[in-house]
Image (cartoon, grey):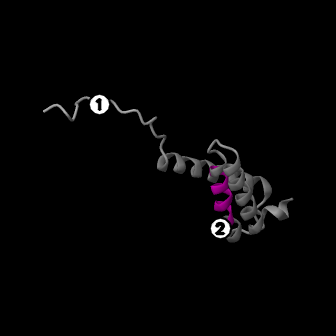
């Protein structure tokens, strides 16, 4: 199992599977995990001898950072209800 965690293609595959799950299941949580898995690709390429627990810890932290970035960029939109304080027909 530790050998699989040091392969870059495993993390790319995990990112694709998590992205597919995000499309199929609403909730906007799996996209952060997919970004974390994509973030693990350069980490695994730079540090090829990474062990399993450290890889999962880095994956979790990268997923959290990815989720926070998504929350900042895609803030929750309002329901679209607008309060009109002035009528445009009154002059």
Using a 10 Å C-alpha cutoff, classify the residue at mark 2 as few (fewer than 14 neighbours), some (14 to 19) or many (20 or more). few
Residue at mark 1: 84
Q: Residue 17, located in which quarter of the rendered image? A: bottom right
Is the magenta region chiefly helix, strand or loop? helix
Give the mark nearest the N terminus, 2 or 1. Answer: 2
Q: Which mark is residue 31?
A: none
The answer to which image quadrant residue 43 occupies is bottom right
Q: Does residue 87 appear in the picture of this structure?
A: yes
Q: Position of residue 20 (x, y in %)?
A: 71, 55
Image height of 91 relative to 3, above or below: above
Q: Quadrant of the N terminus?
A: bottom right
Report x, y in % for residue 35.
63, 56
Q: Residues within 10 Å of mark 1 (few under 14, many from 20)?
A: few
- Dot 2 lies on which element? helix
On the image, numbered disc 2 is attached to which residue?
Answer: 42
- Quadrant into which the C terminus falls: top left
Q: Residue at x 33, y 30 (%)?
A: 83
Q: Marks 2/1: CA distance?
A: 51 Å
On the image, which quarter does residue 37 sit in? Answer: bottom right
Q: Residue at the right extreme?
A: 1
The residue nearer to you, when weighing 7 against 58, is: 7
Tag in front: 2 or 1: 1
SS of the residue under disc 1: loop
Pointer 2 and pointer 1: residues touching (CB < 8 Å)?
no
Q: Which residues are magenta?
A: 32-41
Q: Residue at x 67, y 55 (%)?
A: 34
Residue located 48% across and 47% down the image:
72
Give above or below for 39 relative to 77: below
Visible residue check, residue 58: no
Residue 10 image point, x, y percent? 78, 64
């Amino acid at each position: 199992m530790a050998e699989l965690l040091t392969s870059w293609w495993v993390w790319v595959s995990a990112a694709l599977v998590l992205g597919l799950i995000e499309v199929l299941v609403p909730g906007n949580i799996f996209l952060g995990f997919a970004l974390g898995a994509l973030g693990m690709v350069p980490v695994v390429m730079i540090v090829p001898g990474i062990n399993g627990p450290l890889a999962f810890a880095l994956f979790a932290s990268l997923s959290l950072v990815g989720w926070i970035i998504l929350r900042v960029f895609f803030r929750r939109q309002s329901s679209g209800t607008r309060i009109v304080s002035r009528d445009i027909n009154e002059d």
